[in-house]
């Protein structure tokens, strides 16, 4: 079998500029969803059906650190080529909680590896378009305090962008990092919450607005409320970058943070309302929704 690109590129729902998706790999070998052409064709077909035109593709087990082999790099070239020839933008995905203060390791084991991979590609369609960092230091602030890890992550992003000006470099961020009660951090001459610093540093931010209704519901805030501080800041500051509304589809608790069990149509109904709220002529940063992740989304019922 061979990988067959889409004849017609994906069309993002709601006439949004983009629809993104996180893709996490498994173990190298038969357990990895990139391991066979049939699995990659299933991924490409799915992207065409749901209108996903941007994918954040986990690279660690293929290209990161000591995992690199010529065979794995060649396999990644085939996969990326199939996705890009189908009309998708492909960003490398990786991350760990402490990367904001471990720059040398990240540069040596991730950024240099990705640069080397792109340099070895013989066709532009095999190259990654950038890097998405999933560095969730806020999930353990006792070990990774925001006061040092947020500025560190911003500096890491800036360093990567300086080395690779053509790359789109972004981060995943929890919606609470821009909440009113989030403690302010002083960095680069500004004192403000982490989320605002991250927007200043990045070319792309996927905000984890993890709720399963667009509007507030049953005492829980909805996606629009979660995302509004991010969109307001981007608009007020005139930020020229890409801001995604991130949603969850995997089986996690509490149930109100995920669309798991609700079906694809129910999710799209809510995302259409979100799009209407943020896709305005006076606001340019919102580009669409970003779904976590392929495993959850593809397994959802209709």
Image: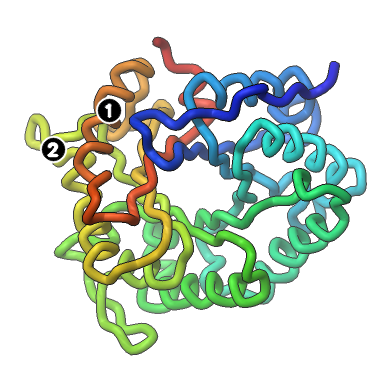
Q: Which residue is mark 2?
A: 220
Q: Position of residue 96 (x, y in %)?
A: 56, 57
Q: Relative to 51, say whether 158 is above or below.
A: below
Q: Position of residue 79 (x, y in %)?
A: 75, 35
Mark 2 to mark 1 CA distance (whole Å): 11 Å
The image quadrant that residue 188 belongs to is bottom left
Q: Which residue is mark 1?
A: 255
Q: Helix, strand or loop at disc 1?
A: helix
Q: Residue at x 37, y 60 (%)?
A: 138
The image quadrant that residue 144 belongs to is bottom left
Q: Position of residue 76 (x, y in %)?
A: 79, 41
Q: Quadrant of the C terminus?
A: top left
Q: Is residue 79 left or right of residue 10?
A: right
Q: Closest to the observer: 49 or 28?
A: 49
Q: Quadrant of the N terminus?
A: top right
Q: Residue at x 23, y 40 (%)?
A: 223
Q: Residue furthest left?
A: 219
Q: Residue at x 64, y 44 (%)?
A: 58
Q: Closest to the observer: 37 or 260?
A: 37
Colouring style: rainbow
């Amino acid at each position: 079998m061979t990988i067959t690109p889409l004849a017609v590129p994906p069309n993002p729902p709601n006439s949004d500029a983009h629809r993104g998706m996180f893709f996490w790999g498994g173990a190298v070998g038969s357990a990895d969803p990139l391991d066979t052409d049939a699995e990659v064709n299933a991924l490409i077909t799915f992207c065409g059906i749901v209108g996903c035109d941007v994918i954040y593709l986990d690279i660690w087990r293929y290209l990161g650190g000591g995992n690199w082999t010529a065979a794995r790099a060649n396999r990644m070239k085939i996969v990326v080529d199939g996705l890009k020839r189908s009309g998708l933008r492909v960003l490398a995905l990786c991350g760990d909680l402490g990367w904001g203060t471990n720059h040398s390791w990240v540069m040596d084991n991730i950024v240099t590896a990705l640069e080397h991979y792109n340099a070895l590609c013989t066709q532009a369609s095999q190259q990654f378009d950038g890097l998405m960092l999933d560095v969730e230091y806020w999930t353990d602030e006792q070990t990774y305090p925001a006061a040092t890890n947020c500025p560190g992550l911003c500096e890491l992003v800036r360093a990567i962008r300086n080395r690779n000006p053509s790359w789109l470099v972004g981060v995943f961020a929890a919606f609470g990092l821009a909440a009113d009660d989030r403690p302010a951090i002083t960095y680069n001459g500004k004192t403000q919450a982490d989320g605002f610093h991250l927007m200043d540093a990045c070319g792309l931010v996927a905000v984890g607005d993890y709720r399963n209704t667009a509007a507030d519901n049953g005492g829980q805030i909805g996606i629009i409320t979660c995302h509004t501080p991010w969109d307001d800041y981007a608009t007020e500051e005139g930020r020229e970058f890409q801001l995604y509304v991130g949603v969850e589809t995997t089986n996690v608790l509490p149930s109100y943070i995920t669309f798991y069990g609700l079906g694809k149509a129910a999710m799209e109904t809510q995302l259409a309302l979100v799009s209407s709220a943020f896709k305005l002529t006076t606001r340019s940063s919102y580009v669409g929704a970003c779904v976590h992740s392929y495993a959850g989304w593809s397994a959802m019922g209709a």
